Amino acid sequence: MGRSASSRVFRVARFSTATFVFQESTFWQKLLQEAFDACFLPDQTSALHYSSIFFGGTFMPTRDDAWALLCEFTQSESLRKHMLAVEACVRAYARKSGADEDTWSLAALLHDFDYERWPNHEHAAESGHPSEGAKILREKGYSEEVIRAILSHADYTGVKRESPLEKTLFACDELAGFITACSYVRPSKSVLDLEASSVKKRMKDKAFARGVSREDVINGAQELGIPLEEHIAFCIDAIRAEADALGLRGNIEAQSSAVT
């Protein structure tokens, strides 16, 4: 490792002096090599990222990073939109409570990113979804707050839900899927004219969207300490705000024109 390469890392990372202990392992060797390679890229983001690891700073992947990871592991358009819908609900709750929207958004967006590859129908606690995803997220530098929330949304992992983020992610997961299903069967095929009372009514029909756990929807609202209908209405509003991205605008404008 030449002195010029080392000093260049310091300059790009805006460090005048720095010390770190290099651990002899494949992981650290690879990371160190990537750090030096990053110094010769036109954008400084990568260098700042790696220098923060070596010099004691903190780094959290961005939403763009999370979306790229999601798309790498998930090809299904409907599953991608499900994670976007859950993100919309969880982010709205973060905004309402004054929590960190970016952190809550990452947990929601990535909560099922490994499901397509490791669906885990056997509900194994330490393998398959979401445990395999948690391993990947740790390797990529996601916080334990995000990882624990993702693990806790599946009861079979044994990770008890404790934080507001963990309870919110669980409460929004099944409900977001159910709201989407309710929107698709409306004449308008839109979430924009969907009401909470209609969703509650659909919940009583066990043949409708049978893959959605009504028990989880009910328990989720209880864990949040919010009346079920209020929780449903809040999530509908959050999803309405992202109707275009989620493909849930439907043909409501055409329906409205026909009525008038």
Image: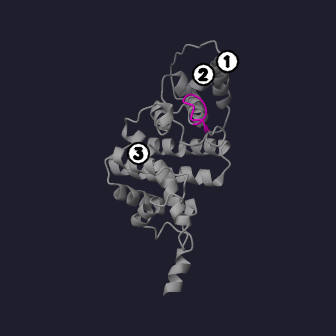
Magenta stretch: includes residue 127? yes
Query: Which portion, as a residue range, is magenta?
Result: 120-129
How far separated are the C-alphas under marks 3 and 1?
A: 38 Å
The residue that appears at 47% across and 68% down in the rendered structure is 192
Camera-nearest label, 3 or 1: 3
Instruction: Tell me the quarter of the picture where residue 110 sits.
Output: top right
Name the disc covering residue 7, or none: 2
Q: Pointers 2 and 1 in contact (CB under 8 A)?
A: no
Find numbered disc 2 in the image and state the secondary structure of the residue it sits on: helix
Q: Tell me the amino acid under the disc marked 2.
A: Ser
Residue 161 in the image: state x and y as whole percent.
40, 36
Q: Which residue is mark 1?
A: 26
Q: Choose top left, top right, bottom left or bottom right for residue 196.
A: bottom left
Cα separation, mark 2 vs mark 1, equals 23 Å
Residue found farthest to the bottom: 260
Residue 159, above or below 199: above
Disc 1 marks which amino acid?
A: Thr
Seen in the picture, residue 79 relative to 246 is either above or below; the reply is above
The residue that mark 3 highlights is 168
Query: Distance from label 3 to label 2 (Cα)?
Result: 45 Å
User: Within 10 Å of the Cα at label 1, are there few (<14), some (14-19), or many (20+) other Cα atoms?
Assistant: few
